[in-house]
């Protein structure tokens, strides 16, 4: 098919020092008139159809070259057909006799891929041979003669190779292979006569340069994408095969069941691989490009998934259609915005960016090669493995399936493709090619013409990786990967030369000044010209980051255990809201912060619904940034330096805690002892850093930003208070201050203790005062006073002594500060002074009954005793750090639970749980120790009978598994039904247990709300391990109320709680930073917090209400953190660092922006929310 691109032009340059001319407006900005010009597809210009016309004309072929290519491909066939060259002696007469009785095998669908591979192998050979013999002649006799000679030659080659294979084990010979090879040769011959000249012209265009090469490469990529999309071509050929396929786990309307595990990760490369096709489908700028791209991607996804449905080994699922649609949108956005890029600034930063990416790339490369998968072995063991290594190219590819072999080859090529691209970019961004250098010397840059350097560097890098595998027991080196790496890097450099070849032009005029260096601080404002240079680069980066974040958030929603349909629908509605009103992002993010952690129901400990919302917030807000916007961080130099240094310390701590990586199985993200808990600990700061550009834009209007902060935190606090009132009314009662019940609120992370709820309440309440301070009307003030009182009640019923003290301290700071501000003669000071007094009165009136209650008084009376146990715990934590000689850098983020379990001097350990897989079946394994309850919320009806059943396998003759059905919040149980499973039967054998459980007494009379009921499992027999499977709780109608009852999805829908909280937290904010980041991180943390408070205090004294609020809020954070832990809760650490950065920005100069802050709201029925 001829691929034509109309209405385009390509930049051309004339000699003689004259400037480049175009017949339209290019979207790539010239560095100056007469500067070197990167030639790229320019969407709004015109180009002759010859640029992309691959139709046959007077194309001639070099038959000598084709004969050489055919001979080379013949050698490849011989090599691949005789590999692994294990020759065994066989008399020629016996071989000939056997060859005359070659069997015709009955091959099932499982062997069809091997048959198709033989067919595909001979298609290029038949095509090349026919092209070399017949050429482009169209005389019927010559065509017939050439085709016949080519077919007979191909048949002779196939028969000769099949005969020779008898002498090489473990090769097999069959008529099936011969028929497939003859069919492949015939298809190749037919393909030459049908499209040979088009293919020849396509190849000639690729090996050339300029627009023809780029268009030919895109067409070739599209053809390769479709061809590989059908691999390994094991098509379904019978009704029974179709039935088996449709009922298999490889097919799903949304997500194929087989993809509940790791293969969902392929959605990301699926989207990325579609992106380049956008340059083929949408080369011309047009309206509604994203909508058209989404539709095109969806149609392409339907085509590919339909083809996968026709393939026996293919995986067909609806979510892949969505991923391809998003990938096409991403590609369309990048292609359309690329011509607007100012490549001068991209070149200016090319080398620094590459240098900063080098270490992460090497780390990712080592991880992908499995060098962190297990501890390394010694040199002698590595030497033994080296002796067993086979160096024949593609030796190990022979001993696996065609699909795995191809995936291995492509994945290795993808790993080293960046090497070639990086070397090309490094050369392109060299000083010799910089504008200043060309101005001085008059030289112009040229692309890399030699691909040997990328191949050599990639080959050496692959050699290091493969050598490293000698020391990893679970890995084996494959020398073929060195060849693949060299070829991939060289190909990357070659392709970039073709796609982004640099044309020679006149030097830059000498009067043109070099661009000024960038400024990192708002205090040193950049010039307008520099900002303009950066606008396009920032816009493209924002588009890429935003699209990636949106894809990841939708993927997280689509895989939610709570139900992909409603979670995805809610997420899309939220994205549309931010698209319509992008200025609402800060309010929404803060309002939803305390409420969107449903891990107690989803079972996902490491990724919550709020994380998905934050990703969507980043994605939608970045995409809504107006194109061309340049953002200057609104931070002073000291603040930026401290944030950078502390961020580097945290990054080092993340790497220390994360490596060596654990296997990606059900246990990876199901337990806080996992190394991946480091990622959980880094989530909060990373999300806060990602929002810095958006916060910088908000600082263009500081007063409005302060109001948004107040509204968002106040709304989140209101939702939290409502949840607490429900919790108190449902369990102990609103006014029961005598019972030992401490609220957890909407923080399921308190299943291991911690001070999360009191930290949030005490830090959020000052923003209620800020909300009231900004209001001139009476009803918002009344609302704020009432909410402050209910918030005070909520803090009191945590019965946390640290929380109560922090509340008193922050309230004193607030009242004193706002009282002073209200007496400074400002407008409305009477209302403001009355509000401050009302807040004080309400706080005292509500807190006094609670603080004077019996239980609260008993808590304060035991303070000295509890402090003694707390200091002993701190001493234990310090000793753990010292025992590892990690005082300077710490033990790493999220490592305390694991380090405490293995190194603490505590007399006991918390019980353990984990998942094991036996013959594809997932099993829950419960260890013994201090009580740990694995539980799941079940929907039971009071007064009913239920049947509990499960399979158990103890490691000893005795088993004592406590199974309870309790009305339970997060930590405290009320009415319970207990079913102890005790047995002394044979060990290590499965036993089926079944019993009756009733819910009599559940839902006590007078209760306004039904209490949640949880089914809990606990191994109470010390020194034993029990395997559990197939846990069901059926009602009288036979409905199973337990989700994921066979643990096939790991921790999904299951949760755990414990009675011992010390093994999970350091219980001190500063000691926790020391434990994870060492003295270096602690000193930087203290410097950062000290600098922030030192800058806020003078501003608060000078009547800055936001600074006063931040001082009170961070005082509460620090006060709670003195005796408890809250920083290991990602949502709280995110809030802490978000408020810290926002406060530092408020202290600095306003962000420097060009054009507008955010894109204007889309037309709609409302002009938006007035803040």
Image (tube, rainbow, N blue to C red):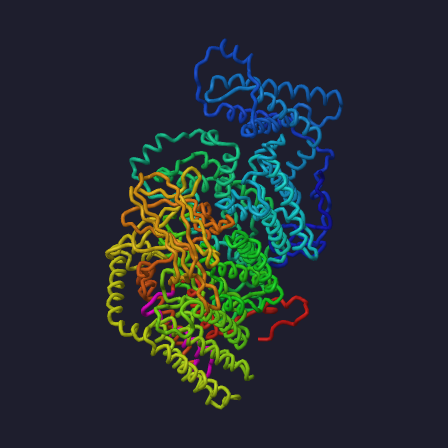
Q: Is residue 264 left or right of residue 642?
A: right
Residue drawn at x 35%, y 48% as measured from the top left:
981
Q: Is residue 88 left or right of residue 507?
A: left
Residue drawn at x 51%, y 72% as measured from the top left:
715
Counting from the top left corner in percent of width and height, residue 517 is at 50, 64
Magenta stretch mostly in which secondary structure? helix
Q: Is residue 716 depicted above or below 385 in this figure?
A: below
Q: Is residue 190 left or right of residue 856?
A: right
Q: Quadrant of the C terminus?
A: bottom right
Residue drawn at x 35%, y 58% as measured from the top left:
1058
Counting from the top left corner in percent of width and height, residue 761 is at 42, 72
Which region is colored magenta? 1099-1126
Counting from the top left corner in percent of width and height, residue 1082 is at 33, 65
Q: Nearer the viewer, residue 1043 or 865?
A: 1043
To which quarter of the image does residue 998 belong? bottom left
Per the image, is 255 magenta?
A: no
Q: Is residue 1066 left or right of residue 720?
A: left
To which quarter of the image does residue 301 belong? top right
How many numbered dots are placed on residues in this image? 0
Q: Quadrant of the N terminus?
A: top right
Q: Nearer the viewer, residue 991 or 918?
A: 991
Counting from the top left corner in percent of width and height, residue 909 is at 28, 54
Q: Is residue 424 depicted above or below 470 in this figure?
A: below
């Amino acid at each position: 098919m001829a691929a034509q691109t109309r209405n385009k032009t390509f930049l051309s340059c004339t000699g003689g020092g004259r400037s480049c001319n175009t017949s339209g407006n290019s979207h790539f900005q010239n560095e100056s008139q007469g500067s070197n010009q990167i030639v790229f597809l320019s969407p709004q210009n015109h180009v002759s159809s010859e640029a992309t016309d691959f139709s046959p004309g007077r194309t001639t072929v070099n038959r000598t070259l084709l004969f050489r290519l055919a001979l080379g491909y013949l050698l490849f066939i011989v090599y691949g057909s005789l590999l692994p060259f294990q020759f065994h002696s066989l008399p020629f007469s016996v071989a000939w006799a056997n060859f005359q009785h070659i069997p015709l095998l009955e091959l099932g669908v499982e062997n069809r891929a091997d048959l198709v591979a033989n067919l595909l192998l001979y298609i290029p050979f038949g095509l090349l041979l026919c092209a070399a013999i017949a050429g482009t002649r169209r005389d019927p006799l010559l065509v017939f003669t050439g085709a016949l000679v080519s077919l007979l030659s191909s048949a002779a080659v196939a028969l000769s190779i099949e005969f020779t294979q008898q002498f090489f084990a473990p090769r097999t010979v069959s008529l099936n292979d011969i028929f497939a090879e003859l069919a492949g040769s015939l298809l190749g011959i037919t393909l030459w006569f049908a499209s040979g000249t088009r293919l020849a012209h396509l190849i000639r265009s690729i090996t050339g340069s300029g627009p023809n090469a780029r268009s030919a490469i895109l067409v070739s990529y599209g053809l390769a994408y479709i061809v590989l999309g059908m691999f390994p071509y094991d098509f379904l050929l019978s009704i029974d095969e179709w039935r088996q396929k449709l009922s298999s786990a490889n097919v799903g309307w949304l997500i194929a069941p087989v993809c509940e595990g790791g293969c969902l990760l392929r959605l990301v490369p699926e989207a990325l691989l579609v992106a380049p096709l956008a340059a083929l489908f949408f080369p011309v700028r047009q309206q509604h490009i994203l909508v058209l791209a989404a539709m095109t991607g969806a149609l392409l996804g339907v085509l590919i998934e339909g083809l996968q449905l026709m393939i026996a080994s293919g995986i067909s699922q609806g979510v892949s259609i969505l991923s391809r649609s998003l990938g096409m949108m991403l590609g369309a956005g990048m292609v359309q915005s690329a011509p607007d890029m100012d490549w001068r600034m991209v070149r200016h930063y090319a080398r620094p960016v590459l240098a900063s990416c080098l270490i992460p790339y090497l780390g990712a490369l080592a991880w992908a090669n499995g060098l962190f998968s297990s501890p390394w072995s010694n040199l002698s063991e590595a030497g033994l493995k080296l002796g067993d290594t086979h160096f024949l190219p593609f030796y190990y590819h022979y001993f696996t399936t065609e699909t795995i072999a191809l995936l291995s080859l492509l994945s290795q090529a993808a790993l080293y493709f960046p090497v070639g691209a990086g070397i090309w970019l490094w050369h392109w961004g060299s000083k010799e090619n910089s504008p200043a250098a060309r101005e001085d010397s008059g030289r112009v840059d040229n692309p890399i013409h030699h691909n040997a350097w990328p191949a050599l560097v990639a080959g050496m890098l692959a050699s290091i990786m493969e050598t490293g595998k000698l020391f990893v027991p679970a890995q084996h080196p494959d020398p073929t990967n060195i060849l693949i790496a060299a070829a991939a890097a060289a190909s990357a450099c070659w392709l970039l030369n073709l796609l982004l070849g640099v044309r020679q032009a006149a030097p830059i005029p000498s009067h043109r000044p070099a661009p000024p260096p960038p400024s990192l601080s708002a205090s040193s404002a950049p010039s307008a010209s520099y900002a303009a240079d950066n606008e396009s680069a920032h816009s493209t980066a924002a588009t890429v980051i935003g699209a990636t974040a949106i894809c990841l958030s939708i993927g997280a929603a689509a895989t939610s255990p709570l139900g992909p349909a409603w979670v995805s629908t809610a997420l899309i509605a939220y994205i549309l809201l931010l698209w319509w009103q992008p200025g609402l992002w800060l309010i929404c993010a803060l309002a939803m912060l305390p409420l969107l952690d449903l891990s107690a129901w989803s079972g996902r400990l490491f990724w919550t619904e709020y994380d998905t919302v934050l990703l969507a917030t980043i994605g939608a807000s970045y995409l809504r940034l107006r194109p061309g916007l340049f953002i200057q961080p609104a931070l002073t130099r000291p603040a930026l330096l401290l944030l950078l240094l502390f961020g580097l310390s945290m990054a080092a701590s993340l790497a220390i805690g994360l490596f060596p990586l654990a296997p990606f199985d059900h246990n990876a993200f199901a337990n806080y002892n996992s190394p991946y808990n480091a990622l959980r600990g880094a989530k909060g700061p990373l999300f806060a850093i990602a929002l810095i550009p958006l916060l910088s834009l908000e600082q263009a209007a500081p007063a409005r930003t302060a109001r948004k902060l107040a509204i968002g935190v106040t709304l989140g606090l209101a939702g939290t208070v409502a949840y607490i009132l429900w919790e108190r009314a449902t369990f102990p009662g609103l006014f029961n201050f005598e019972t030992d019940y401490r609220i957890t609120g909407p923080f399921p992370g308190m299943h291991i203790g911690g001070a999360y709820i009191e930290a949030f309440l005490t830090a959020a309440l000052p923003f209620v005062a800020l909300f009231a301070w900004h209001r001139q009307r009476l009803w918002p003030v009344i609302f704020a006073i009432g909410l402050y009182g209910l918030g005070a009640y909520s803090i009191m019923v945590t019965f946390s002594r640290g929380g109560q003290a922090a509340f008193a301290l922050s309230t004193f700071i607030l009242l004193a500060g706002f009282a002073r501000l209200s007496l400074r003669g400002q407008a409305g000071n009477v209302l403001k002074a009355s509000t401050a007094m009302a807040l004080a009165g309400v706080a005292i009136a509500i807190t006094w009954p609670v603080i004077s209650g019996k239980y609260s008084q008993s808590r304060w009376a035991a303070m000295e005793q509890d402090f003694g146990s707390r200091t002993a715990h701190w001493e234990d934590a310090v000793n753990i750090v010292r025992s590892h000689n990690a005082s300077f850098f710490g033990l790493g983020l999220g490592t305390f639970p694991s380090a405490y379990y293995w190194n603490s001097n505590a007399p006991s350990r918390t019980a353990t749980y984990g998942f094991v897989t036996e013959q594809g079946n997932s099993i829950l394994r419960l260890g013994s120790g201090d009580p740990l309850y694995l539980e799941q919320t079940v929907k039971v009806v009071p007064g009913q009978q239920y049947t509990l059943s499960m399979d158990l396998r103890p490691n000893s003759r005795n088993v004592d598994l406590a199974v309870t059905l309790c009305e339970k919040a997060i930590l405290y149980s009320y009415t319970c039904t207990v079913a102890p499973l005790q047995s002394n039967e044979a060990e290590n054998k499965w036993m089926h247990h079944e019993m009756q459980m009733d819910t009599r007494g559940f839902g006590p009379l007078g209760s306004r709300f039904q209490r949640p009921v949880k089914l809990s499992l606990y191994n109470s027999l010390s020194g034993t391990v029990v395997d559990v499977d197939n846990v069901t709780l059926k009602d009288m109608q036979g409905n199973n109320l337990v989700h994921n009852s066979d643990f096939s999805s790991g921790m999904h829908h299951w949760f755990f709680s414990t009675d011992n909280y010390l093994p999970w937290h350091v219980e001190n904010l500063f000691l926790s930073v020391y434990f994870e980041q060492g003295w270096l991180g602690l000193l930087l943390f203290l410097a950062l917090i000290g600098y922030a408070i030192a800058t806020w205090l003078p501003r608060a004294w000078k009547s800055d209400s936001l600074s006063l609020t931040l001082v009170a809020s961070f005082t509460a954070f620090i006060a709670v953190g003195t005796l408890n832990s809250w920083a290991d809760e990602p949502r709280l650490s995110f809030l802490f660092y978000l408020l810290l950065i926002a406060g530092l920005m408020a202290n600095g100069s306003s962000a420097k922006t060009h054009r507008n802050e955010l894109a204007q709201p889309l037309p709609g029925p409302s002009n938006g929310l007035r803040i």
